[in-house]
Amino acid sequence: MLPRGLVGRIAAWVMVTGHKSIYKNMSELLDLQPEDDLLEIACGCGHFLKKYASHVHNIAGLDLSQLMVKIATRKNRDRVAAGTAEFVHGEASRLPWQDNKFSVITTMGSFIAFPKPLETLKEMYRVLQPGGRVVVSVEWNAEDGLDHTKEVNRWGMGLWMEDDIRSMMIEAGFVDVSIAYAQGFKMPKMMLAHAMKPDEMSPSKSEPQEKVEDQKLKIVTQIADLSRLLGMIPSDDTIEVHEPTTHNSMALSKWFSVTRSSFLRLSVLISKTLDIQLQ
Ligand SMILES: C[S@@+](CC[C@H](N)C(=O)[O-])C[C@H]1O[C@@H](n2cnc3c(N)ncnc32)[C@H](O)[C@@H]1O
């Protein structure tokens, strides 16, 4: 049932009061940074974006209710006027943005109402930047010990188990899916699912595992070449490089970038000190 008219306005006010615990938990998990471009799907009256995301670079909200889009736009009018906020009318499984636009995407208080949850997660994945993060809260769920028969019959609400959410997120392409629980008003065990979109350096559905091995080999070869160039090891010797201790894709990706940037910094330092022209 979509919020409309006077009842909709009252519902928006009640929602903000009842969702305080959701907003607090979500803002901790989202860990929003000033450089973030944040999208909230089913943003309602835009309260979360106004109160908890005032410091981020850009905010965007989408909602199926015209009334909610209107209220959210008015609530955030200064940012809308400044061009750092936009609110659009639309359905969660058809997002009107180009690929890789946002660094963080969230939805709260709404997932159980989405008619196409998997398509929605796929859309979130599409518009999320590589390396970006997603946080989805599922306040009422099949793990919370409540009887939701009435709501399922009345609204066709999705009654999700932890495994359902996890496998949908993985099917949508996300990695590092983790699920935590929190308590809130009339929500004894809300599910908070956090995940990442792999960045270019990590293996993904379209990148086979060999590519990771290729990348590791490239880094090791570069270190060996530089060491040989500097006479640190004999030209026919090998060097030992510590392997990452995990096959977790995001951790591997971090390992690559940390190793690569330390190596580059080290090369520049050594080349400056020894006045060597690196090729
Ligand atoms: C309970 S409110 C939560 C609003 C907001 N996330 C909050 O916590 O304050 C649910 C919102 O989801 C929106 N909604 C429901 N189904 C939707 C859909 N399929 N696509 C986009 N928005 C939807 C409703 O219009 C409503 O504003």
Image (spheres, grey):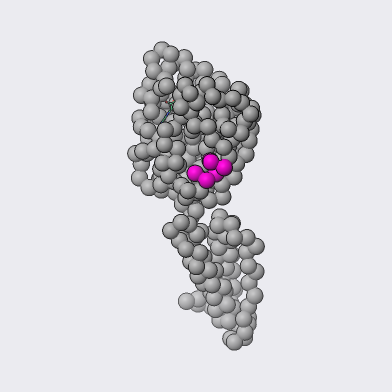
125, 157: nearer the viewer: 157
Q: Residue at x 47, y 76 (%)?
A: 279
Q: Nearer the viewer, residue 191 or 159?
A: 159
Residue 252, given in percent of the width and then of the height, sits at 57, 60
Closest to the observer, 271 or 24: 24
Up the image or down, 207 lies above or below 166; here it is: below
Residue 22 percent location from the top left of the image? 57, 29
Residue 71 seen in render: no
Residue 109, how many percent across, how many down? 51, 29
**As drawn, 110 above or below 130:** above
Left or right: where 63 falls relative to 161: left
Is 134 included in the stretch rendered in magenta? no
Residue drawn at x 36%, y 38% as measured from the top left: 94
Residue 167 in the magenta stretch? The answer is yes
The answer to whether residue 207 is visible is yes
Q: Which residues are magenta?
A: 163-168
Q: Nearer the viewer, residue 81 or 239?
A: 239
Question: Which residue shows up at 61% across the image and 26% down it?
Answer: 146
Task: Give the quarter of the image for residue 73.
Answer: top left
Tell me residue 269's x, y (percent): 58, 69
Dividing the picture into quadrants, the one containing residue 121 is top left
* Vertical arrangement, residue 109 with respect to residue 192, above or below: above
Which quarter of the frame holds ligand 1?
top left
For this orientation, the residue located farthest to the top is 6
Give the quadrant of residue 44: top left
| Left or right of residue 84, residue 269 in this image | right
Residue at left 52%, top 37%? 136
**Quadrant of the rendering where the N terminus is positioned:** top left
- Taken as a whole, is the magenta stretch helix, strand or loop? helix
